[in-house]
Image (tube, helix red, strand yellow):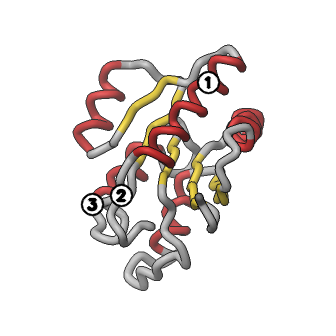
Amino acid sequence: MQTSPIEIFFVEDNFDEAELLFYALRKLNITTRIHHAQDGAEALEYFFGANPSDSPQPVHLPRLILLDLKLPKVNGQEVLRQLKSNSMTSAIPVVILTASNEERDILECYRLGVNSYIVKPVDFEQFKQAVRDIGLYWLTLNQIPAMIN
């Protein structure tokens, strides 16, 4: 039985879609703590600080990062590139959750090291089911290194 909350880091600029994700995750009955960044710059600052040479580590590394691609300030592919190229964050599973089903985006994200690429369903029930499936797999079935636990 899960005793401490599972940390999830979610990067999404659309408030309505963020609320849908929060709602769908609550329905899973998995104890989670969700950190939400509204743009790519905010996400990078959380992990690497305002000055990357300082490289402060967050208090808790998340167990999962859900990342949109089309973000203001710094796009999702750049966030992914920096996360996967840093030894502190490279082992954290990153799931792209985006509206883009363009082949070039999918290929580039896999080239950069994404763990999964999911196109957001438009229908709320399908979206809720997709979040449920993501949560069940990445938060309960997937084995992760001890450094993330």
Mark carried by residue 85: 3
Q: Secondary structure at mark 1?
A: helix
Q: Position of residue 110 (x, y in %)?
A: 27, 36
Q: Position of residue 136 (x, y in %)?
A: 52, 39
Q: Which residue is mark 2?
A: 144
Name the kind of residue labelled 1 in the image. Gln
Residue 6 falls in image quadrant? bottom right
Q: Secondary structure at mark 3?
A: loop
Residue drawn at (63%, 66%), measured in percent from left and top?
3
Within-10-Å neighbours for mark 1: few <14, some 14–19, many 20+? some
Mark carried by residue 129: 1
Give whichever of 33, 109 is nearer the camera: 33
Within-10-Å neighbours for mark 2: few <14, some 14–19, many 20+? some
Q: Position of residue 142 (x, y in %)?
A: 39, 47
Question: Mark 1 to mark 3: distance in Å?
Answer: 31 Å
Give whichever of 55, 129 is nearer the camera: 129
